[in-house]
Image (cartoon, helix red, strand yellow):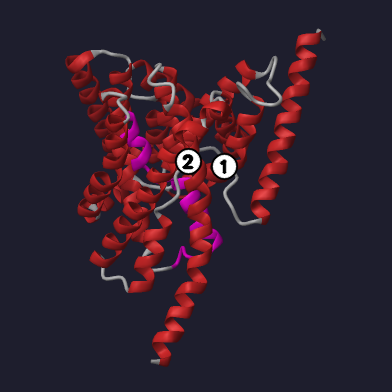
């Protein structure tokens, strides 16, 4: 074995071991490990204390697989019929979510003089809630059975579908294909999403028959292979590999989706961690201080607008004050999609400060969201005692 391969194995081993230690530390404090993964990437990336020498290319490929697996497992959470039902039920709340939470990012980009392309990217960065972190918070705190949880999940589904249309548009804009090309890309995206939903609704049993297998090894290979293949085709059509993987997940449902989710979760967690590290690798820590004040303002605004979104949607569904508070807080975290969008913008050469700003923004909200959720429980119980006493 040559020295390059030896160095590669040593670097990868050290990185994965450190990721495990960071995840352990995060779980002890009840936090998402995402902020620590980003910090780890900052330490070993450009301008960091321990820059990598041989494994960065491998990590880049692993990061792409991480995005695909994140969106694939997210798609497995929903059936096509659930998506259609949730669209009807949460249309008004979803519209409010877009208006309230995309606007701060768009405004910030224009105020900073970054231009319309950066504004489109920043709108997506401030808009999307982290489905992964929110789902983990709901599970860890025992909120899954609460009345407001379906409202929160409906809003998250709306965001995922919005991303399915937004990401192709962003990809086209970043590629500079112009209005005509962007319109064509959007039409392709809408057609692709519609066809997959139609197949899932009408012919889902045939897809499941093709994928299904009593052997878990065979099942894992089939699902992973299909997800990567469809993601590659989607990327070729400029629909986004992430969206392609999401649609594959939607096409599977029932026990098959549950089994697939269990098989893919460890693999997803590994490559998702690599993805967050890779984004940190691309961010120079020296560029963070100049954008911290902007990130802090966006964080304060993002907390208020997401809380208002969850509160409004829960109130409209007839949920009480305590449930409205939990719904609002559950919407606060940012994570996967935000970093995906920022990564696309950085790779396309949009303003050099956008990457550091997105990293700081996600770091703060990925910490604030779970912490606020944990603090909400005692506050709600105290409020109930006060109301009972009066």
Q: Does the magenta-highlighted stretch encompass residue 132?
A: yes
Nearer-N-terminus badge (2/1): 1
Say which residue label 1 marks. 35
Q: Does the magenta-highlighted stretch encompass residue 89?
A: no
Along the viewing direction, whichever of 215 and 317 lies nearer the viewer:
317
Query: Residue 362 shows which numbered tag?
Result: 2
Q: Residues within 10 Å of mark 2 (few under 14, many from 20)?
A: many
The structure residue drawn at horizontal position 45% and vertical position 49%, both measured from the top left corner, is 333
Element marked by disc 1: helix
Residue 131, percent from left and from top: 44, 47
Res. 250 image quadrant: top left
How many marks on residues? 2
In this view, the residue farthest toward the top is: 2
Res. 357 image quadrant: top left
Q: Residues within 10 Å of mark 1 (few under 14, many from 20)?
A: many
The structure residue drawn at horizontal position 64% and vertical position 49%, both measured from the top left corner, is 26
Residue 10, percent from left and from top: 78, 22
Quadrant assignment for the N terminus: top right
Q: Is residue 44 visible?
A: yes
């Amino acid at each position: 074995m040559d020295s390059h391969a030896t160095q590669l194995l040593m670097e990868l081993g050290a990185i994965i071991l450190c990721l495990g230690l960071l995840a352990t530390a995060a779980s002890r404090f009840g936090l998402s490990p995402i902020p620590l993964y980003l910090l780890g990437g900052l330490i070993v990336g450009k301008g960091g204390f321990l820059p990598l020498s041989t494994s960065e290319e491998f990590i880049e490929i692993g990061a792409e697989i991480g995005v695909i697996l994140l969106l694939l497992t997210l798609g497995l959470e929903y059936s096509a019929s659930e998506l259609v039902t949730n669209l009807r039920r949460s249309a008004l709340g979803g519209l409010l979510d877009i208006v309230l939470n995309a606007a701060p990012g768009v405004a910030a980009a224009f105020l900073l003089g970054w231009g319309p392309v950066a504004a489109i990217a920043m709108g997506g960065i401030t808009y999307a809630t982290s489905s992964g972190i929110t789902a983990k918070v709901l599970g860890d705190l025992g909120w899954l059975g609460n009345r407001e949880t379906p409202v929160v999940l409906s809003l998250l589904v709306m965001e995922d579908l919005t991303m399915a249309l937004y990401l192709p548009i962003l990809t086209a804009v970043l590629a500079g294909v112009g209005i005509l090309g962007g319109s064509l890309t959007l039409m392709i995206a809408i057609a692709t999403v519609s066809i997959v939903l139609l197949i899932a609704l009408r012919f889902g049993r045939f897809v499941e028959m093709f994928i299904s297998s009593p052997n878990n090894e065979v099942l894992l290979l089939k699902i992973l292979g299909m997800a990567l293949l469809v993601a590659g085709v989607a990327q070729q059509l400029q629909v986004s590999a992430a969206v392609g993987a999401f649609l594959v997940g939607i096409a599977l449902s029932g026990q098959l989706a549950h089994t697939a989710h269990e098989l893919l979760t460890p693999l997803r967690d590994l490559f998702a961690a690599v993805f967050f590290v890779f984004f940190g690798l691309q961010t120079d820590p020296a560029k963070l201080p100049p954008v911290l004040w902007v990130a802090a303002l966006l964080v304060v605004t993002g907390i208020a607008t997401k809380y208002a979104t969850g509160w409004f949607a829960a109130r409209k569904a007839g949920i009480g004050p305590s449930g409205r508070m939990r719904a609002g807080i559950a919407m606060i975290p940012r994570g996967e999609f935000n970093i995906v969008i920022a990564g696309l913008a950085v790779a396309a050469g949009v303003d050099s400060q956008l990457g550091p700003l997105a990293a700081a923004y996600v770091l703060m909200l990925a910490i604030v969201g779970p912490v606020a959720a944990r603090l909400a429980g005692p506050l709600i119980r105290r409020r109930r005692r006060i109301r009972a006493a009066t």
